[in-house]
Amino acid sequence: MLEIKEASFEKHGEEAGEERSPKASSKSLTERKPSFQTVSLEEVNRLYTQADIARLDVDRDLSFPGHFPYTRGIHATGYRGKLWTMRQFAGFGTPEQTNARFKYLMREGQTGLSVAYDLPALMGYDADSPLSEGEVGKCGVAVSSLADMEALFDGIPLEDVTVSQTINAPASIFLAMYLVVAEKQGADWKKISGTLQNDILKEYIAQKEWIYPIRSAMKLVVDTFEFCTKDVPRYNPVSVSGYHIREAGATALQELAFTLRDGIEYVNWGVRAGLDIERFVPRISFFFNAHNDFFEEIAKYRAARRIWARVMRDHFGAKNERTMQLRFHTQTAGVSLTVQQPVNNIVRVAIQALAGVLGGTQSLHTDAYDEALALPTDKAALIALRTQQIIAEETGVANAVDPLGGSYFIEALTQKMEDGARAYFDRIDAMGGMVEAVEKGFPQREIQESAYQYQKALERGDQTIVGVNKYAMQDEPQEVPTLVIDESVRSHQIERLEQTKARRDNGSVVKALDNLRKAAEHAENTMSATIEAVRAYATLGEICSALRDVYGVYEEPAI
Amino acid sequence: MDRGRIRVLVAKPGLDGHDRGAKVIARALRDAGMEVIYTGLRQTPEMIAAAALQEDVDAVGVSILSGAHNTLCPRIVSLLREQGMNDCLVVLGGIVPQEDIPKLKEQGVAEIFLPGTSTQDIVRFLRENVRPRE
């Protein structure tokens, strides 16, 4: 289908011949600037032709949607069968406040839930810890024990709704809390679906919300794989995340390469623990960023599917299709949002979301326009959801599968992404693997360098941000109302924590925590001891402390 | 007269781990000829004030994304003042709602830099506002 013969080019005036051989004619045509670069500072040619995809073998490299290597998507019907899941990341203040936001979004047509936890929760501290002061409920919802989780999901049937939880270092505890809440609702664990972010590698690489040393933390991740495969078979115990790597300053290629190599690392660790790839790998999901450079992003998603399918088949010997199919969630780039002229962010988000859709995402979060200022208000969150609904139901982009497949530009970019990612894999493999590369600070340094180079390009004016380094307005009116989380959230949370501790059987808590320490010491699977502790209403802080007693804490190397 | 190089402590208080901004700023200030000490992540206000004193810095640049600025910044300023660092400039960068800015300035934060600020503007501000040494 890509065998377009020279003769099929129609001539349009005198320049048509030149347009077909852009390199020969570059001197004779004047352009706005000496070079054109993506937001990742990658050079873009003026024109892409058959010559740029000379290596592409359509059957081998593209095939059809739903067929290996899945470049064109994992479903033969694309979005004609099922639209992507509209899954808005939400969480702020108390569990009750976030529960109300969840219900509001679902009433307005959102099709899945995604929980943002606050920083104390992400770091494994209770609301009453001195370290939690000023942070409770600020960046997400405050949760310190099962009692908070019960309030968070009150009236939300966990057997029917899929919930994604953004939690990493203490992820196994949140999985346990989620399952116990579901059980109390009468849900069957075998029917529960949803996703735990649980991607600890990217924490050391980019987001930096870690607790334990890296190898102990990897062991906890493998525990969840093993447990879910057996007891919660429809649940995704990890969402391997490029999102945060990109936000920290990585290029599109670095996001792709480090994320997929993290995924490979999890598979390696699972295999070493004796797990069957055909059972646990199908439940590994991915999470990518959608940044401003439209075509570069689409190529990134297409390349991700192709690389994963090939690595699973050729390196790990996968036989089942589901083991080779990369499924992913997408979130628009928070880092691209501007404080200046913030309503412009609605436009950025729409275009980024469109890239995710044209790249074949399984689920999507669209950022709210006010997120460079604070957590989103109800109104801003609603516009973000409506943006997805407009893309899905008005624009027609969901009607045909992989509509950009076969574009010279897209296919050349997809190939370049695959080649670049494989070159990074080789460098990381030479270091001994991703854990070793992270210990050496390699991905961290690469990302830091890219972040700085981008900042310099921006300040030179080589990259443009509308309203910031171009079209800036003096005395811009400030009209955006923002969501305020006050300190009363912390006192409310501390009160519930005290009530919970007063009500529970402290003997069971002590026993459960002892069992958990023993499981960790003997390198047994920690999940059942964690569930026991959660059921006894041991707090998040108490459970993390028990594991810290055994594992110790991570110290970041100087980078 | 050579007033010596400006010494800046780039500090990351609170539980937040988003350090892209702090690291870009640290490097930009270094490139501009300043001496920069980066605290690393998750420093308490007490640790930051102690580091500022020990390193004898002219300015502390605080980076916060998490919304905890209203709790953390005033405490950093008062700890610095308590230990006699009355001229030490405190500046803040991060996700800070407009309505918080006047209060932060009242509490002694010299300037608040929001997302989109050029590193050159920050360099200029420090050069113009750091008190010359005796």
Image (spheres, coloured by chain):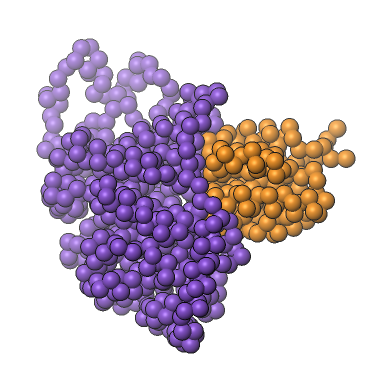
The relative height of residue A276 versus residue A207 in the rendered view (above or below) is: below
- B110 and B55: which one is in front? B110
The relative height of residue A237 versus residue A373 in the rendered view (above or below) is: below
> Quadrant of the rendered structure where residue A558 is?
bottom right
Q: Is residue A47 visible?
A: yes
Q: Tell me which chain appears purple.
A: A
Q: Can you say which quadrant of the picture contains the C terminus of chain A? A: bottom right
Q: Can you say which quadrant of the picture contains the N terminus of chain A? A: top left
- A469 and B90: which one is in front? B90
Q: Is residue A232 visible?
A: no
Which residue appears at 49% of the width and 84% of the height? Answer: A506
- A152 and A441: which one is in front? A152
The relative height of residue A471 versus residue B80 in the rendered view (above or below) is: above
- A63 and B15: which one is in front? B15
Numbered label tally: 0
Which residue appears at 35% of the width and 21% of the height? Answer: A26
Question: Residue B60: x percent and y percent?
Answer: 70, 47
Farthest right residue in view: B134
Question: Residue A191: x percent and y percent?
Answer: 21, 69
Q: Tell me which chain appears orange.
A: B
In the image, A14: left or right of B60? left
Question: Residue A395: x percent and y percent?
Answer: 20, 34
